[in-house]
Amino acid sequence: MARFLTEERRNKIAESIIANGSIKVNDLIEQFSVSKETIRKDLIYLEQSGIIKKSRGGALSVLERMERPLKDRAMEAPRQKQAIAEYAATLIRDDAVIFIDSGSTNLCLAKLLYLRKNLTIFTNSLSVANILVESENQVYICGGLLNATTMSLVGFGATSFLEKLRMDFAFLGSSGFHGHHGPTSIDFTDAEVKKTVTRNTRTNIVLAHSAKVRSTAVIEYADWKNIDCLITDSALREKEEQELSKLVKIYKVEVP
């Protein structure tokens, strides 16, 4: 009976981590009313099974280390992403020179800019360019190697083009920031594109829904001190906001 309960608990832990991307040890202790040592053994078992990756104070889903297709990510938290994009769009003046990163929240922003005029828009995202190609804005897409998962252009062709530019605003995505001192990317070549953009932009803005605070990726592409603000949704937890606000200015938007 005890073995069955152990297996059931471990299955529930695995399901929770996969669904949420990450989880804290203290939350598991409270949820299952077991000791820290018991949870530690559960996490070791799940890590050895290839389901999770232990992190400081908790665990991450192995899926957090694998970029998922854009069409799949676009289905997650659509109301939050739309609200974030709507707020971001209000910051852009009509004659601005901007960069729009790849990612599902930035795709929401691109749709909102379709009816705008006189913007100069640079992007490495084929999806963003496709949305804006018939708008009354000047749209430039960089060269580079096509990442079929994110539908974005990366590598030397992208960075050599972008490093020659000077932009007013950059709207950047992130795979998460848990355990880092800034936003992250899952891919080294994508991280280099983002680094190049942040160096050449007057105002760098990260768009990320609140669940990204509890997920992470391998590569930190910028320190929060080099990011002007984070736009997220009102589901950001108070403790998370307190910690993040020490590092970066936060705008929380209400979700209808």
Image: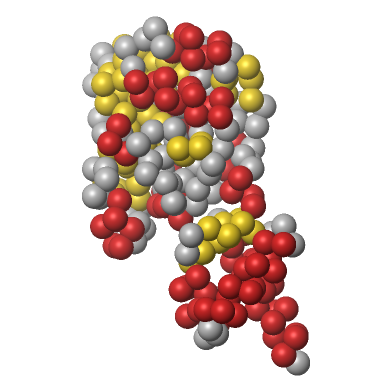
Can you say whether 255 is above or below 39 in the image? above
Residue 21 visible in rendering:
yes
Q: Residue at x 48, y 60 (%)?
A: 56
Where residue 197 appears, as percent x and y from the top left, is 39, 21
Question: Which sits in the foreground, 11 or 95?
Answer: 11
Find residue 83 and report its image quarter: top left
Question: Which sits in the foreground, 191 or 251?
Answer: 191
Q: Tag count in the figure?
A: 0
Residue 128 visible in rendering:
no
Question: Which sits in the foreground, 235 or 218?
Answer: 218
Find residue 92 and report its image quarter: top left
Where residue 245 appears, as percent x and y from the top left, is 25, 50
Can you say whether 149 is above or below 242 in the image? above
Q: Is residue 156 left or right of residue 206?
A: right
Where residue 3 appears, as percent x and y from the top left, is 75, 86
Q: Residue at x 56, y 29 (%)?
A: 188
Task: Specify the farthest residue to the bottom.
Answer: 1
Task: State the quadrant of the N terminus.
Answer: bottom right
Q: Residue at x 61, y 45 (%)?
A: 65
For the rendered model, the colour scheme is secondary structure
Where residue 79 appears, as percent x and y from the top left, is 44, 48
Q: Is residue 115 left or right of residue 3?
A: left
Q: Residue at x 58, y 60 (%)?
A: 54
Can you say whether 77 is above or below 164 in the image? below
Q: Is residue 92 left or right of residue 31?
A: left
